[in-house]
């Protein structure tokens, strides 16, 4: 369980570093174009690794259907909702709504995966959400004419990601990890590419060395590596135990700002970080059996 926890923390850290790099990318390309390139390039890298290692492709229709739907829900809907909502909502409100995903996934996992979190686990998940709300409360603004639309986009994205986790969990022990994640990303990138063509975003790309470096970090360390690690984790632990670590993503974002950019954290934010830490500890120490597989 210690290894699962450490890798889960590493995944959330890798995802958290995406936010400053996405912000840096705005000077060179529209958000949705970066989202498309991030997904497509990361997917192609993983498929190339699978080919080099001679890993088997999915071999039945059910696996292909599951991977396709996971691509549409996680990559197409997830990336679209998160990236687009970021332009409509304050960071605090977007963070709070995004972190309903572990709650949604826990409910879906209860029904579709027969995962039964204990009372302590459910309390821990609830505490984690409260911690995120406290952390983000200072930057939540409600006098926003686009608030309802932005919340809708974030909720759609959160539901999409939760659904994709359920789908991937069901095939985690049946398909090759590199092919599954590579195909999911490439398939999910198709609608994003069509959206960019429709919006004419391709003409706005400034392919400079700086943008190539930014995109490289987003694709390799923000997408390809954490997606493979996440799929590995789905083979080894209940989804609700893994999802609670997603509360660390905004926490890492704050700590990166505090350590590297000298951004001061308020006492209320430190309280939120402390509560989030307690929540993760509670879920991690709960007595549900961990699923072990090779």
Image (cartoon, rainbow, N blue to C red):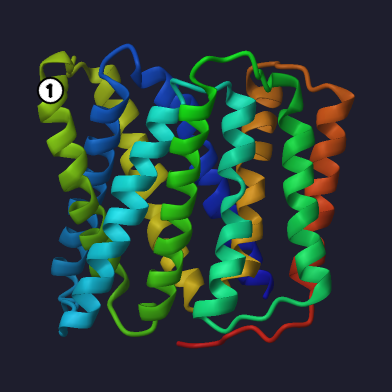
Looking at the rendered image, the quarter that the N terminus falls into is: bottom right
Residue occupying image coordinates x 85% and y 43%: 274
* Image location (x, y in percent) of residue 60: 16, 85
* Image location (x, y in percent) of residue 191: 18, 44
In this rendering, position of residue 173 left or right of residue 202: right
- Vertical placement of 274 versus 113: above or below? above
Residue holding disc 1? 202
Circle 1: element type? helix
Can residue 236 be seen here? no
Q: Quadrant of residue 175?
A: bottom left
Residue occupying image coordinates x 71% and y 24%: 258
In this rendering, position of residue 100 left or right of residue 258: left
In this rendering, position of residue 157 left or right of residue 174: right
Instruction: Count the labels in the image.
Output: 1
Foreground of the two, 195 or 33:
195
Foreground of the two, 144 or 264:
144
């Amino acid at each position: 369980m210690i290894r699962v926890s450490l890798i889960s923390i590493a995944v959330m850290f890798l995802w958290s570093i995406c936010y400053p790099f996405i912000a840096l990318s705005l000077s060179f390309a529209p958000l949705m174009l970066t989202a498309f390139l991030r997904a497509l390039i990361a997917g192609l890298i993983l498929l190339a690794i699978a080919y080099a290692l001679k890993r088997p492709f999915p071999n039945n229709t059910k696996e292909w259907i599951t991977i396709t739907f996971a691509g549409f829900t996680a990559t197409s809907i997830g990336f679209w909702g998160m990236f687009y909502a970021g332009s409509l909502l304050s960071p605090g409100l977007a963070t709070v709504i995004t972190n309903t995903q572990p709650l949604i996934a826990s409910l879906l996992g209860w029904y579709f995966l027969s995962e039964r979190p204990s009372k302590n686990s459910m309390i821990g998940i609830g505490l984690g959400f409260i911690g995120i709300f406290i952390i983000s409360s200072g930057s939540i603004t409600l006098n926003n004419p686009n608030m309802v639309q932005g919340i809708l986009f974030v909720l759609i994205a959160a539901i999409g990601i939760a659904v994709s986790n359920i789908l991937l969990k069901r095939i985690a022990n049946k398909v090759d990890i590199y092919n599954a994640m590579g195909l999911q990303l490439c398939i999910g990138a198709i609608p994003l590419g069509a959206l960019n063509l429709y919006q004419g975003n391709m003409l706005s790309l400034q392919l400079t060395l700086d943008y190539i470096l930014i995109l490289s970090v987003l694709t390799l360390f923000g997408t390809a590596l954490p997606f493979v690690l996440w799929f590995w984790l789905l083979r080894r632990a209940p989804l609700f135990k893994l999802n609670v670590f997603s509360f660390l993503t905004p926490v890492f974002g704050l700590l990166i700002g505090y350590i590297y950019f000298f951004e001061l954290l308020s006492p209320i934010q430190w309280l939120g970080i402390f509560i989030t830490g307690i929540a993760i500890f509670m879920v991690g120490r709960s007595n549900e059996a961990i699923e072990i597989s090779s």
